[in-house]
Image (cartoon, rainbow, N blue to C red):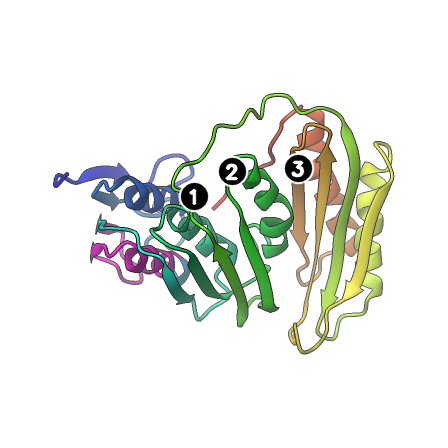
Amino acid sequence: MSELLDIDGSVLEGGGQILRISISLSAVLGVPIRVYNIRAGRKKPGLAAQHLKGIELVAEMCQARLKGAKIGSTEIEFIPGTIKGGHYTADTKTAGSISLLLQVALPVALMASAPVTLDLRGGTNADMAPQIDYMGEVFRYLLNKFGADFSLDVHKRGYYPRGGGHVTIEVTPVQTMRGADLTERGTLLNIHGWSFVAGSLPVKLAYEMAGGVRDRLGRLCKVNIECYKEDREMAPDNCSGIIVVGDLSSGCVVGSDALGSRGAVPRALGAKAGDDLAAVLDNGACVDDHAQVRRV
């Protein structure tokens, strides 16, 4: 197929999500595409470092021809080739989300001709994106339902604004994926999660965030949140955050997360994460907002 399929990057919220999905599907299906109006709905339209590195990563994996791939570009052409296994690296050089790099590259890696290793650098816990812990503890189990899997090893945490995180993902291709029925949620079995601080922040903030989650979700079942401070070798910079997971009798897993920021009240931050998960549980959904890829 030589004719380019045109995709308007301004549809819906006009963010980077349509770009990531388009690039992944182009590589997997072998369909050349042109994406225009890239991130038209953002304050700074066009490709940022995270988007550019994701495109370049997938282009390397499938030997694609690229046009217009540079910072700030609002239009690109992507002409895919054959997806090859191997060891691939990508570094945003910023706190750009590693989870979003994985989001664009993982579907392609699953269809490669041989096993794939992804060495990704950037932000492990970034705003407006799933935290890397969510990818390993929620998204991975949803992916298992479709007959696919990956392993994830966090070597170093990277936070805003410096980034510097490092994660390795090992993928064994499956070539085809099975269907999965995610229409029956079942009952809530348990709620658990992790509340962390890093750098010079006191661990009491982690306990306060966990308390906020219990305030919101304790009515549903016992809430088990592990509170801890990251080792300085793993996470030298300041950050705080929380990841909350609900296990369902159907085998589905839903989650929510929140990141601390200057001036944020830790207990209120935890309460927000609790409210987000409660909204998913109350509306009967089998997947959460991250799994619906509706953000960014």
Amino acid bearing label 3: Val
> Mark 1 or mark 3, which has the lower sequence index?
1
Q: How far across and how far down the image is residue 174, in percent?
A: 43, 43
Q: Is residue 274 left or right of residue 179?
A: right
* Rendered residue at 67%/71% (across/down): 238
* Rendered residue at 54%/40% (across/down): 143
Q: Residue 62 in magenta?
A: yes
> Mark 3 or mark 2, which has the lower sequence index?
2
Residue wearing tag 2: 147
What span is in magenta? Answer: 51-76
Discs 3/2, front: 2
Q: Secondary structure at mark 3?
A: strand
**Label at residue 253:** 3
Q: Residue furthest left?
A: 2
Q: Residues within 10 Å of mark 2 (few under 14, many from 20)?
A: few
Q: How far across and how far down the image is residue 21, in percent?
A: 38, 42
Amino acid bearing label 2: Gly
**Callouts 1 and 2 close, C-beta under 8 Å:** yes
Residue wearing tag 1: 174
Mark pair 1, 2: CA separation: 8 Å
Q: Secondary structure at mark 2?
A: loop
Q: Is residue 183 left or right of residue 229?
A: left
Q: Is residue 184 left or right of residue 208?
A: left
Mark pair 1, 3: CA separation: 22 Å
